[in-house]
Amino acid sequence: MLSWKLHGDGKSIQPGEVVGIGERLTWPRTIGFGLQHIAAMFGATFLVPIITGFSPTTTLFFSGVGTLLFILITQNKLPSYLGSSFAFLAPVAAAKTEGGIPAALGGIVAAGVLLALVGFIAKSAGTAWIENFMPPIVTGTIVMVIGLNLAGAAKNDFVAGPLLGLITLLSIGFIGAFFKGFIGRISIIGGLIVGYVVAALMGDVDFSGVNSAAWVGLPEFTTPTFSTSAIVLFLPVVLVLIAENIGHVKAVAAMTGKSLDDQVGNALVADGAATALAGLGGGSGTTTYAENIGVMAASRVYSTLAYIIAGVGAILLALSPKFGAVLAATPAGVKGGVTVALFGMIGVLGARIWIDAKVDFADPTNLYIAASALIIGISDLSWTSGKFAFSGIINATLMAVVGYQVFNRIAKARKNR
């Protein structure tokens, strides 16, 4: 199953040709493309543990392991890198207030298991039911809520170091506006680097942890704890991961001109397994990465072997605690500048889902669902019942998913009279 045919002479790609999923170039070139994938996923994968307080090296370790697992479960037919998912940011923050990082990890494990179960159902029943259950009005609303619900957290970090936050935020905008291609696409990590360097020059970075960290060592593994009230917080994330994985499969199929519908179920199972495994050891939940799709589109190299090299490379990088300590020392103000831009971008991605799908907001049901869910989520309209806490994101998700199904059916029944 894990085999690759040499593409042509292995040294060049002729105009109009692509390096297929089961092909490879010469080893030096393939390794080079693997390093490109590491660079593409690097910034976003590390942002999540920097923001949540997870161990960066542990997160990187499980992203590498998860990528290898993904290639194996999808039978070497679907190229993808599994990096940290931003959809986990809000529930992790909420779960940490209840039971710290272990409780958040328990929620990540539960989300992974549920995603894998959806994958097994999709393997036997197809995916039409998913698309009916989660139309663009629903998925776009949930993604937007997940981003904008975090506005308060971004504000708290920003005001902790407003000068550094402003420098970081403006650097992100400048890099995105001035540079084209790959550099422009990684403006978030570019701004983070600028903010970090400025903070270090100002003496605002605590390097004590960096000085005491070893150059080589195993990542810091953490055992999860399981709380029903914390697990409930992660249910909306599963819906986002389903949409992201299906979107990834469709994007790769469009680029390669090869139908990959038979791999949707495997992709969901693989991402679910990788997410659960990460949660069991102290890493963040994973998802398929659009950044790496960009690398494939630009290079016309779709070889899964490049992703295997990227996964192995990520694991090797994770074996440096000093490297992780440098990232963990990021000042709050710098994180604030990053999160103001990042959380807003996540929210705008929800609007992009609406636009791409041409959601009709002249339809009263669509307008009502989006408007109500957004206010519930952004204002964090919450309530508790015994040991269960229903956060704004949970309630907004219920409004989007259940509300759409109920009111859309009422509207259709009325039209059919």
Image (cartoon, helix red, strand yellow):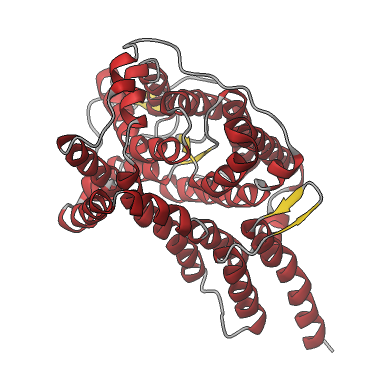
Report whether 239 appears left or right of 166. Answer: right
Can residue 144 be seen in the rendering of this structure? yes
Q: Give the residue drawn at x 20%, y 43%.
A: 194
Q: Nearer the viewer, residue 402 or 328?
A: 328
Q: Work out whether 35 lies above or below 268.
A: above
Quarter location, residue 162: bottom left
Q: Nearer the viewer, residue 208 or 66?
A: 208
Report whether 79 appears left or right of 12. Answer: right
Q: Work out whether 109 lies above or below 134.
A: above
Residue 372 % position (x, y):
63, 74
Quarter location, residue 32: top left
Residue most extreme to the right? 417
Residue 362 % position (x, y):
58, 85
Residue 113 % position (x, y):
70, 35
Q: Quadrant of the C terminus?
A: bottom right
Q: Work out whether 370 lies above or below 309.
A: below
Report whether 227 appears left or right of 353. Answer: right
Residue 180 % position (x, y):
19, 52
Q: Quadrant of the N terminus?
A: top right
Q: Work out whether 147 lies above or below 363.
A: above
